[in-house]
Image (cartoon, rainbow, N blue to C red):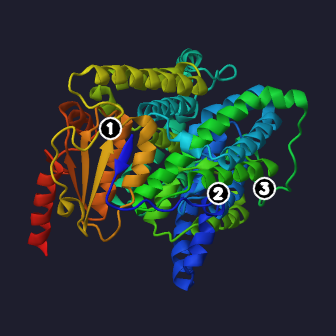
Amino acid sequence: MTTKSQTMPPASPGFSDLFTPKLITVLREGYGPKQLRADAISGLTVAIVALPLSIAIAVASGASPAQGLVTAIIGGFLVSALGGSRFQIGGPAGAFIVLVNTTAAQFGMDGLILAVFLSGLMLALAGWLRLGTFVKFVPYPVTVGFTAGIAVIIFSSQVKDLFGLTLTGAEPGPFLEKLPVLAAAAPSADWQAFAVAAGTMALIFTLKRYRPGWPGILLAVSLAAAVTILARFDIATIGSRFGAMPAGLPMPHLPAFSADKVLAVLPAAIAFTLLGAIESLLSAVVADGMTGRRHRSNCELVAQGAANIGSALFGGICVTGTIARTATNVRAGAHGPVSGMLHSVFLLILMMIAAPLIAFIPMAALAGVLAVVAWNMFEKHAFWRLLRSSRGDAAVLLATFGLTVFRDLTEAIIVGFALGSALFIHRMSEAASVELGAPLVQPDEADDVAPRKAYDEAADVQRDVVVYRISGAFFFGAAAAIGSVLDRIGDSHRALIIDFSAVPFIDSTAAHTIEGLVDSAARRKVAVWLTGLNPATEAALAAQGVCPPHVRIESDIATASRKVRAALDGTT
């Protein structure tokens, strides 16, 4: 898979360039009171969002509310200070709830913290070995499938507190074992708890729709606590279940470990590492798409490793980049990593001031918050779109989703990746067997073997138009590399032409990459033209929403260049 453009490729960056934190980059650009004010406002906004979320995720993970805040404070600060993403916000994430809960139940809290510490070491090592690029090889249907599966598990884990159920024994972890236990406890449902949970969810959704700039989660949780106190509801609260909240950070210390314990928790640590790398880099990609910036994946993995080590030293749980909080950071007008660092400082101040009040938050309200988190995690449009795109993508999606819900997350990712690879091989065999189709590797040819058109430099070299030619199979293994090239559209460019005439096929991951590029170009008012599409490629792109009027389609570069020039001349 190759791309060609009329611009010369930049010189390869050195080792120090690749691992220089974005914080240093921002400070070198010039940092003054204006930038500090923007970062302070966005940092406070994110802290207000992160406070109830960190508590809710920690509780659902089998940890204490204080551990959730410690994770967001220590881990969030280190992710922003050392990371390769300008806008990344680190902290506890909903995607880890299942793994953390399972690990804590199996090995105890000491075992969980040791697994987090080991995971930090492995993430940092993966970054130093420059393995971050390989994380981008995970097919898009696998990502959507395991995220949707995690959402289902998170929701099922909150049914007990949503309805105030009283169980006769411990709540089972596996999904199929959990359902009959919850059904048997249905007669014990508490209408007060359900009213608080339903009211919390309704207020969050209402504020998100009509007042998106307001801190909906914090307002909903605060109102739920006030109603519970004033109405004297007899329902579980953070205080009744966990006791008083500490008003500060604990002293750091190494987790207890031995050779046997390290071997025992190693599989969990590997699972934390794999999921943490995927989640953090996905979050960084989202921030890139919203801002037009580019993150450094290996530097980001090193920072994620340092954050998990730091979190474990203070008794916290897994840290990763969080998509929702990172997006909030961007929308709040953050200038750079100082915003994430200040978010941690503000969280520490809130923890010290509001610790006694946190004890009054009802567990039903936290369950309502996590139900909303699960709803948002389930990428509904992407899920249904992949189901309709092709039978192969649908099979990978459903296999990953089913294994996540009914078996194990790590197993789901491995099987999903294997199925995605098998699907690629199958498509390659089909592409190679099509008569007169474009070969997967173009052979060298002499100039006089076949008649060829004279080179028209005007068609390729235009100051405000950039032309890219993609050659070869455009699939999940090449999507990251090609996407990184296509994203480098200068602000001076007004149109982008992408030629697919030498592309035998494109899969859903690559089509999703083009979709992200089109969205980014639209925000920068850059028109996108696609040329040389075969019917299969055009259909795959259309399934991801890459079709007119979002893009314009022409048969060849010459036609597109002529129409682009006419359109631009008409607007100048």
**Would you name the residue on which mark 1 appears?**
381
> Where is residue 284 drawn, in percent x and y?
51, 53
Instruction: Inspect the image, locate mark 1, and give the three-letter code of the amino acid beneath it.
Output: His
Instruction: Inspect the image, locate mark 3, and give the three-letter code of the amino acid beneath it.
Output: Pro
**Would you name the residue on which mark 2 appears?**
79
**Would you name the residue on which mark 3 appears?**
246
Disc 2 or disc 3, which is closer to the eye? 2
The residues tagged by marks 2 and 3 sit, at their Cα atoms, a distance apart of: 24 Å
Q: Nearer the viewer, residue 12 or 530?
A: 12
Name the quadrant containing residue 252: bottom right
Disc 1 or disc 2, which is closer to the eye? 2
* Residue ranking furthest to the bottom: 33
Q: What's the residue at 69%, 20% (across, down)? A: 169
> Where is residue 547 drawn, in percent x and y?
20, 44
Callouts 1 and 2 close, C-beta under 8 Å: no
Q: What's the residue at 71%, 31% (across, down)? A: 268
